Image (cartoon, rainbow, N blue to C red):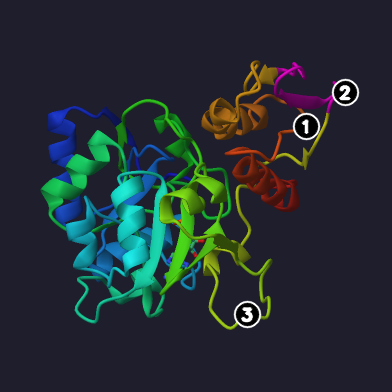
Amino acid sequence: MGGTRPQRILAADDRAIAEVIRHLDAGGIAAVPTETVYGLAADAANPAAVARLFRTKGRPAANPLIVHVTDREMAARHAAIPPLAERLIARVWPGPLTLVLPKRADAPLAGAVTAGLPSVALRAPDHPVMQAVIRRLGRGVAAPSANVSGRLSPTRAEHVAGLDVPLVLDAGPCRVGLESSVVRVEDDRLVLLRPGSLDAATLAEAAGVPVEAAAAGAGAASPAPEAPGMAFRHYAPRLPLDLDVTEAAPGRFLIGFGAVGGDLNLSPSADVGEAAARLFDALHRADASGAERIGVAPIPEAGAGAAIRDRLRRAAAASGGLP
Ligand code: AMP
Ligand code: MG
């Protein structure tokens, strides 16, 4: 699945943004920066473009895509917006929060985007380049992370190298560094389908209601569908990964945090937000280090720590023995 065609990494100036928009408008795909991770973008209304996107990532057809919009108004063309969603949109958008909402029958979306579900996942990204791309294209942009399905997410333009995509818009390292929180809005309930840098307590505060945890694991008995994507392998480094490691060991690249120094430290001052922003880059570096294993220091559950631990648990479960 490695890039066979040459890939151009373009600094995200006006000219490069215009080229990417022309390319997307013509049914192409391109990697674009957001505040969370780099996304692999396609016109969400174009079935051929969306099919190309799934194929390029090797993404299972059953895993629906997030549609990126500029704002509430563009969101309302795609979905019904119940009062709880209005509250979250007013307080958190643009930002790293994806809302799963009832899809409108006339939503301008290729069917594959939502994997046949009656709902659609929407997010307004807080990044000037991605905002410009969506605004000037004038349509929703489907954009999962710009990595081969199951592998590490890209938080720098150069991390996109493994993907067969001709254009990468480079706007430097991503500020947040973790994928968005995904919340399903059901009338008067909120269910957290995927943790992100905005933790459940922050979201509950913004919404004024508690945020419930999704039923754990794949195939869990649940009356409502959970995020289909959480059932698949995710965030796998090439090397096997060990959690909560505090000691250096031969052949093991140690990713430190706080007082656990390591070969590289996610945040010497033990700030989980800083650690989140550096996490995927650290895993990419560990993979390239020549070590045989990766160890990661203990990260507290507070704030973005819960999402970091979620990614690391999935990485540990999925990693090892990859090419
Ligand atoms: P990604 O695009 O890889 O960042 O992942 C998007 C996440 O949102 C995946 O876990 C998807 O399964 C989930 N998702 C997208 N659309 C829906 C939907 N309509 N209902 C529930 N989960 C969704
Ligand atoms: Mg992803």
Queried on whether the Cβ of the residue with tag 2 lies below 8 angstroms from ligand 2, the answer reads no
Q: Which residues are magenta?
A: 246-263
- Element at badge 2? loop
Q: Residue at x 68, y 66 (%)?
A: 216
Main SS, magenta residues: loop
Q: Position of residue 295 (x, y in %)?
A: 78, 32
Q: Which of 250 and 297 lies nearest the eye of the viewer? A: 297
Label 1: how many residues lie within 10 Å, few (<14), some (14-19) or many (20+)? many
Q: Residue at x 29, y 68 (%)?
A: 81
* Mark seen at residue 295: 1
Q: Is residue 264 above or below residue 46?
A: above
Q: Are marks 2 and 1 in contact (CB under 8 Å)?
A: yes
Q: What is the quadrant of residue 27 in the picture? A: bottom left
* Residue occupied by mark 2: 249
* Residue occupied by mark 3: 222
Give amino acid for label 3. Answer: Ser
Foreground disc of the pair 1, 3: 3
- Asked whether residue 51 appears in the rendered view, the answer is no
Give amino acid for label 1. Answer: Gly
* Mark seen at residue 28: none
Does the magenta-highlighted stretch encompass residue 254?
yes
- Element at badge 1? strand
Does the magenta-highlighted stretch encompass residue 157?
no
Mark-to-mark CA distance, 2 and 1 = 9 Å
Give amino acid for label 2. Answer: Ala
Q: Position of residue 317 (x, y in %)?
A: 74, 52
Mark-to-mark CA distance, 2 and 3 = 43 Å
Q: Position of residue 230 (x, y in %)?
A: 58, 62
Q: Earlier in the sequence, mark 2 or mark 3?
A: 3
- Element at badge 3? loop
